[in-house]
Amino acid sequence: MNSKNFLLDFTIPQGPTGPANGLNAYGGRYSSCLNVLNLDIATPVDLPLDGTITANNINYTTNGLNILNQGIYEITYILDVTTSEKADITVSIWENNKLVIASEKIKSLAEKESTLFVASTICPLDKDSTIDITISSNAVTEITLEENASIIVKQVN
């Protein structure tokens, strides 16, 4: 069997150049410690997210994020929750106190059951919007929020 080398001469078309730094806007918050929250019936509570990651065109509020660029964003969250009582637990993302489309997840948990909430959505966000993540319940319960809770936002357009 003979082996030969061939010289190929062609050009592959290149698409438009993206932003010089990659993403135009990104940021996130996380919980650096275990938190215990007391939930009342149908009363959303902001998740206590004390840590912040490196950000670009995003500022941080007490437990949320302030968007500095209007655009389409991917929002992803993850949290590990244990309930003290049987309850339906709801986790939601809010933009300026308005529910973000396709962000709400509801899980029915037994007493002392743990579950992982993981969700991602893509949605338009306005400049100067404040993004928060909340948790609520259909029963009075105490929840334990493990230290891995986080929310990440990335501008994708």
Image: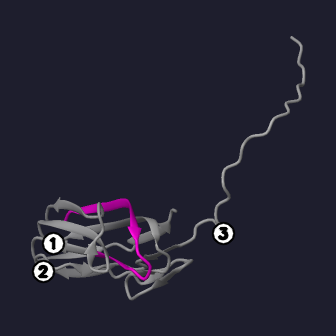
Kindly report which numbered mark, 1 or 3, lies closer to the viewer in this rendering.
Answer: 3
Mark 2 is on which residue type?
Answer: Asp
Q: Farthest residue in the top direction?
A: 1
Task: Judge the density around disc 2: few (<14), some (14-19), many (≥20) Cα neighbours within 10 Å.
Answer: some
Q: Give the CA separation, mark 1 to mark 3.
A: 41 Å
Q: Earlier in the sequence, mark 1 or mark 3?
A: 3
Q: Nearer the viewer, residue 123 or 148?
A: 123
Q: Nearer the viewer, residue 117 or 124?
A: 124
Labelled disc at residue 137: 1
Kindly report which numbered mark, 3 or 2, lies closer to the viewer in this rendering.
Answer: 3
Image position of 140 (left or right of 64): left
Image position of 125 (left or right of 25): left
Query: Where is mark 3, residue-wise?
Result: 21
**Could one spot residue 47 in this view of the protein?**
yes
Mark 1 is on which residue type?
Answer: Ser
Q: How many marks?
A: 3
Residue 112 horizontal/vertical position (percent): 18, 66
Residue at screen point 57% across, 70% down: 24
Q: Which span of residues is magenta-colored? A: 112-134
Q: Earlier in the sequence, mark 3 or mark 2?
A: 3
Residue at screen point 34% across, 72% down: 146
Image position of 110 (left or right of 74): left
Query: Where is mark 2, residue-wise?
Result: 40
Q: Nearer the viewer, residue 111 or 49?
A: 49
Residue 6 horizontal/vertical position (percent): 88, 25
